[in-house]
């Protein structure tokens, strides 16, 4: 098949691939434990259900304005003021088909061929590929100490005349790290000094643990919304557990947004009217479900960290937020792809290889599921890897014997 060179160069999404593998195994009756998913199990807010249902019962489901319905934009403006302390107008907001599309629209708007985008490692798997799809170059910046928190001097060392933007995702997928306020201040000041766009992927900003708080980039900006190079991306997928509705948004300067509307108009036209109605319900409705999810995830996080710390040879940093932890399994294997494959084949546990996130030897584990799944999943991983663990284990109703070295 004759496909474009660009299309051939784009890597397959490992999370989507693993989700599909897990689905097929479960359909075949296999007792798979999925520790790779980035999807909360909680029900979506009832206000979202009622709002979507009310729209459906009109039997009048049409195109919406490219930048979103007035009702949803109004809800986002209020949400932004409450959570960021910044007042924006409708001319600063565009609604997208999920936060992932929001980032794609931002990059399409900003990038020329050969431009560079700084991406902090570990990073969400799609950032580099999305940059490449714009014929631009992802520049990966890792911390020299090998930890999950970036350092401003490492960012400065990678700046060139081609640097167009920096992407910051805090709380971070895959590590769960929450970047310190000092770093957010430093990166804002650096970007403003150098005239670089700062793309803040804040999709997990409500899911922070242990009494810590979210730091808004606006706090350290000297510019107002229409002169700022800060671009905020957010959505309802994570905090409201509304992954299937595919609603995200961008908040930025009016001059940028006008071009973003043109980009979206020529690609997807507009987000779904029903999904936008659901998002209005979520944002305007009772917010207790968000805190309930955060508390649930914090408890699950504590369980997973406790189980992993009892696992000899594993190094783990306590996540400050999100759904994920990112333990270092390099004592067992530095080949995270091979290790993830082994755990799926031998123990029927889905994990995501750290290589996909820019850090080999690690695995991303999700604690979105139940405590039972977390404990049993870690027990299976330990059985598969640790020669000092019991030689036998039950996986489902089958007695399994570790007969490999």
Image: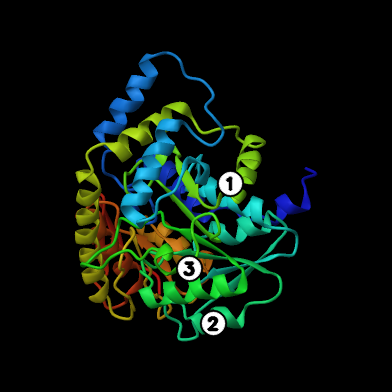
Say left or right for 165 vs 245: right
Q: Where is residue 345 in the image (x, y as percent from the top left)?
A: 43, 57
Q: What is the image's colouring?
A: rainbow
Q: Distance between the residues labelled 1 and 3?
A: 20 Å
Q: Is mark 1 on a helix, strand or loop?
A: helix
Mark 2 and mark 3 lie on one chain; the one further toward the N terminus is 2
Quadrant in the picture for residue 158: bottom right
Res 257 label:
1
State the quadrant of the N terminus: top right
**Residue 267 higher or lower than 322, as above or below:** above
| Up-down relation of residue 89 to residue 218 (above or below) | above
Q: Nearer the viewer, residue 218 or 320?
A: 218
Mark in front: 2 vs 3: 3
- 262 horizontally vs 290: left or right: right
Residue pictured at 28% horizontal, 62% vertical: 208
The x, y position of residue 7, in whole percent, is 71, 50
Mark 2 lies on a secondary structure that is helix
Of mark 1 and mark 2, the one earlier in the sequence is: 2
Categorize mark 2 by other alpha carbons within 10 Å: few (<14), some (14-19), many (20+): some
- Quickly name the residue at label 3: 222
Viewer-closest of 247 and 218? 218
Residue sticking out furthest to the right: 2
For image coordinates 52% across by 27% down, the residue present is 64
Residue 61 in view of the camera: yes
- Tell us which disc is closer to us: 1 or 2: 1
Residue 320 occupies which quadrant of the picture? bottom left
Residue 154 image label: 2
Q: Is residue 310 above or below residue 39?
A: below
Q: Residues within 10 Å of mark 1 (few under 14, many from 20)?
A: many
Residue shown at 30% from the left, 29% from the top:
49
Inspect this view and state whether residue 342 appears. Answer: no
In front of the other: label 1 or label 3? 3
């Amino acid at each position: 098949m004759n496909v474009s060179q660009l299309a051939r160069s784009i890597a397959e999404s490992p999370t989507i691939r693993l989700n599909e593998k897990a689905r097929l195994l479960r359909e075949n009756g296999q007792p798979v434990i999925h520790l790779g998913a980035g999807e909360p199990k909680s029900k979506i807010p009832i206000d979202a259900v009622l709002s979507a249902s009310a729209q459906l019962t009109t039997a009048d489901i049409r195109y919406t304005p490219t930048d979103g319905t007035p009702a949803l934009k109004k809800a986002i403006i209020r949400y932004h003021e409450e959570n960021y302390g910044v007042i924006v107008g409708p001319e600063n907001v565009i609604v997208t088909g999920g936060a992932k599309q929001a980032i794609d629209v931002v990059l399409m708007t900003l990038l020329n061929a050969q431009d560079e985008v700084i991406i902090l490692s570990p990073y969400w798997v799609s950032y580099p590929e999305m940059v490449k799809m714009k014929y631009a170059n992802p520049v990966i910046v890792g911390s020299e100490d090998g930890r999950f928190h970036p350092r401003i001097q490492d960012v400065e060392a990678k700046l060139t005349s081609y640097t167009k933007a920096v992407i910051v995702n805090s709380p971070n997928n895959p590590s769960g790290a929450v970047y310190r306020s000092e770093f957010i201040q430093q990166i804002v000041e650096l970007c403003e000094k150098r005239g670089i766009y700062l793309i803040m992927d804040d999709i997990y900003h409500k899911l922070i643990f242990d009494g810590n708080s979210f730091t808004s980039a606006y706090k350290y900006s000297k510019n107002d919304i229409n002169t700022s190079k800060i671009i905020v991306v957010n959505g309802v997928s994570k905090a409201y557990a509304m992954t299937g509705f595919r609603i995200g948004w961008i908040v930025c300067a009016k001059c940028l947004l006008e071009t973003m509307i043109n980009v979206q108009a020529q690609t997807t036209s507009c987000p779904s009217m029903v999904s936008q109605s659901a998002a209005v319900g979520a944002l305007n409705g009772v917010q207790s479900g968000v805190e309930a999810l955060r508390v649930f995830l914090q408890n699950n996080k504590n369980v997973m960290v406790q189980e992993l710390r009892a696992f000899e040879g594993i190094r783990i940093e306590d996540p400050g937020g999100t759904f994920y932890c990112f333990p270092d399994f390099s004592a067992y294997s530095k080949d995270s792809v091979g290790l993830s494959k082994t755990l799926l084949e031998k123990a029927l546990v889905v994990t995501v290889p750290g290589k996909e996130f820019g850090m080999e030897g690690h695995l991303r584990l999700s604690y979105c599921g139940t405590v039972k799944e977390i404990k049993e999943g870690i027990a299976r991983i330990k059985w598969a890897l640790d020669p000092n663990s019991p030689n036998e284990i039950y996986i489902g109703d089958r007695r399994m014997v570790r007969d490999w070295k």
